[in-house]
Image (cartoon, rainbow, N blue to C red):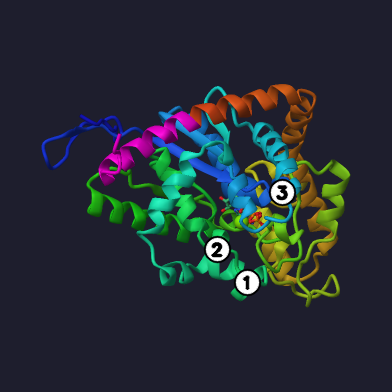
Amino acid sequence: CRRVIIDSILVDKPKGVRIFMKKIILTGDRPTGRLHIGHYVGSLSERVKLQNTGAFDEIYFMIADAQALTDNADNPEKVRQNIMQVALDYLAVGIDPSKATIFIQSQVPALAELTVYYMNLVTVSRVQRNPTVKAEIQQKNFEASVPVGFFCYPISQAADITAFHATSVPVGEDQEPMLEQCREIVHKFNEVYGETLTMPEIYLSKNAARLRLPGLDGKAKMSKSLGNCIYLADDEKTVQQKVMSMYTDPTHLKVSDPGHIEGNTVFTYLDAFIKPDSFEKYWPEYKNLDELKAHYQRGGLGDVKIKKFLNKVLQEELRPIRERRAYWEERLPEVYEILKEGSAKAAAKAQQTLDEVKASMRIDYF
Ligand code: ATP
Ligand code: MG
């Protein structure tokens, strides 16, 4: 009988089959550029914490090159180059290949095959209603010229998640509609073909400021495709320059003017990155962020001082990441091996799921 593990507790399923449910993580990133601090607060830092709890049976981190090609078909070299950049960023933030499998999506052929079968379970109007897809089509000026592959990427994401029987998917808030879509596919598949796929849960960062970090311009979310990012690989000087150029409060012209916190990117970043001892270390005049905010709102506090403080807080967080990145940059052949081994392992696991799927669909003829 098939066995799955839920919190290591045995549960009785209908038909009298004893089912274990393993705790499995799957998540990933598109290799469309180096990773930025939005990825870090929205997803990467949480992943590393989850990885180090030891509470998960299997962990998969996918470099989604096939998905990146859905809106970069004419720029395959960009995607190719960025696979290594994303891998370096993973290792830099503390993803540990002895605890987690890092793999390249295109090297796992079963994912494409699963996508084909799942496509039959989703309507065009359902994908059109997906708010993330809608926003991205607009942002990329696709409208009627949207590539079919791009349009279908929520379905291919469902294949990625279910291929590994993932139970937890730690991602940023923008991915919530994708998880919902995936859950619908799982539900439909199991209903039509019998209990086969595992129902995944989204794992969202608890800190609201970390859910969706805005870009330096304060307009959209920080995104590789919009060029409004502080990258994990940026050197100290670049980070400082970017922080000093950040969008704050356009009505706060003179230092004595009362300032606004809402929509003020510098404060959003402080909300996301501040540590309990940050004030004690770098700005002992204030006890905490509330005191600083109150002073800014009263007036009499200039943007430059706050930016200098934010810069110190950010540099402290980014320094060890930068150092680990430099270590791995010296060892590219080893990184290449990690990707190769991870991809082989992922391919075997996904093939197993594909076999189960085809058996449930009764298209396992030979
Ligand atoms: P692209 O512009 O190519 O879509 P991206 O910057 O949006 O790139 P993705 O690879 O699409 O990055 O996202 C990877 C993960 O990082 C997802 O879990 C996503 O939710 C999260 N993420 C991306 N941008 C942010 C952000 N600004 N704040 C919080 N989380 C983010
Ligand atoms: Mg994105």
- Locate residue 66, reporting x and y percent: 59, 47
Q: Residue at x 28, y 42 (%)?
A: 196
Examine the image and state in which quarter residue 168 appears: top left
Residue designated by label 2: 148
CB at disc 3 and ligand 1 closer than 8 Å:
no
Front-lying residue, 128 or 297: 128
Taking 10 as reference, is 231 above or below it?
below
Regarding residue 290, the answer to whether it shows in the image is: yes
Picture quarter with the C terminus: top left
Q: Amino acid at mark 3?
A: Pro
- Locate residue 153, reporting x and y percent: 52, 56
Q: Is residue 122 left or right of residue 243?
A: left
* Dot 2 and dot 1 residues touching (CB under 8 Å): no
Taking 64 as reference, is 329 above or below it?
above
Residue designated by label 1: 145
Was residue 144 drawn as part of the magenta stretch in this picture?
A: no
* Dot 3 and dot 1 residues touching (CB under 8 Å): no
As drawn, the label of residue 76 is: 3
Span of residues in magenta: 347-366
Examine the image and state in which quarter residue 104 appears: top right
Nearest to N terminus: mark 2 or mark 3 = 3
Picture quarter with the N terminus: top left
The residue at the far front in this view is: 366
Q: Is residue 274 left or right of residue 53?
A: right
Q: Distance of mark 3 from mark 1, alpha carbons?
A: 19 Å
Which quadrant contains ligand 2? bottom right
Front-lying residue, 127 or 257: 127
Q: Distance of mark 2 from mark 3, alpha carbons?
A: 17 Å
Q: Could you say whether the residue bearing mark 3 is in a helix, strand or loop?
A: helix
Q: Distance of mark 2 from mark 1, alpha carbons?
A: 9 Å
Q: Counting other residues with Cα less than 10 Å from the Cα at mark 3, is it few (<14), some (14-19), or many (20 or more)?
A: some
